[in-house]
Amino acid sequence: MLTLMRHGEAGWDAPTDESRVLTAHGIAFIQHVVAENAALFGGVKRILVSPYLRTQQTVNTILAELAHQPEVITDDRWTPESDISSAIASLEAHWCEGLLVVTHQPLVGNLVSYLLEGDKLHPEPLLPAHFATLTMEWPAAALAQRVSI
């Protein structure tokens, strides 16, 4: 199972996009999402995360809520401007059951569409700290089925 998650709500008062920090509301909502989906997050074995501060903070907030500590891999292929082929290469390199990716729009929305439909024509409109869970044998175009949103 693959869970693709957008980072929590971040403020805009930072000198760069990379250094934007989560808001208090963003942190609280991530905690709520993890608590409401305890079985899903309890099954996470590995986390891929963008190097941007808000995604790193999202992962740290998730980890603080878990009874176990999954492997965390920071990967530059998960930044907002990354393309789908780079994201797929990262998934292939780190593929496992119970994989969580914490990343950004528009990449996450485009990737959900690509994995489900084989194209980016209908990107998933994931809000901050929302996620899509998909099942597939291998990460490739139109091979996924939706488990939850």
Image (cartoon, rainbow, N blue to C red):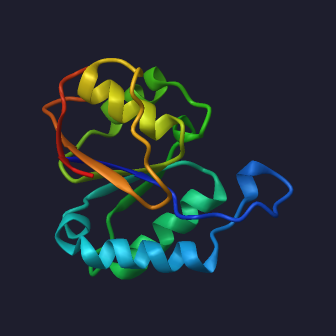
**86 to 72, vertically: above or below:** above
Q: Is residue 3 left or right of residue 50?
A: left
**83 to 18, vertically: above or below:** above
**Where does residue 85 sit, x and y in percent of width and height?**
44, 21
Q: Is residue 9 left or right of residue 35?
A: right
Please state which of residues 2 and 75 is positioned toward the viewer in this rendering: 2
Picture residue at 24% right of the left edge, 70% below the top: 37
Please state which of residues 106 and 67 is positioned toward the viewer in this rendering: 106
**97 to 145, vertically: above or below:** below
| Quarter-of-image position of residue 63 | bottom left
| Quarter-of-image position of residue 136 | top left
**Where does residue 145 sit, x and y in percent of width and height?**
15, 35
Please state which of residues 52 and 119 is positioned toward the viewer in this rendering: 119
**76 to 86, vertically: above or below:** below
Q: Is residue 24 visible?
A: yes
Picture residue at 32% right of the left edge, 64% below the top: 70
**Where does residue 12 sit, x and y in percent of width and height?**
76, 60
Most extreme residue toward the right is 15
Count of number-bearing discs: 0
Q: Is residue 140 visible?
A: no
Picture residue at 18% right of the left edge, 48% below the top: 97
Picture residue at 50% right of the left edge, 58% below the top: 128
| Quarter-of-image position of residue 117 | top left
Q: Is residue 20 left or right of residue 37?
A: right
**Where does residue 103 sit, x and y in percent of width and height?**
50, 48
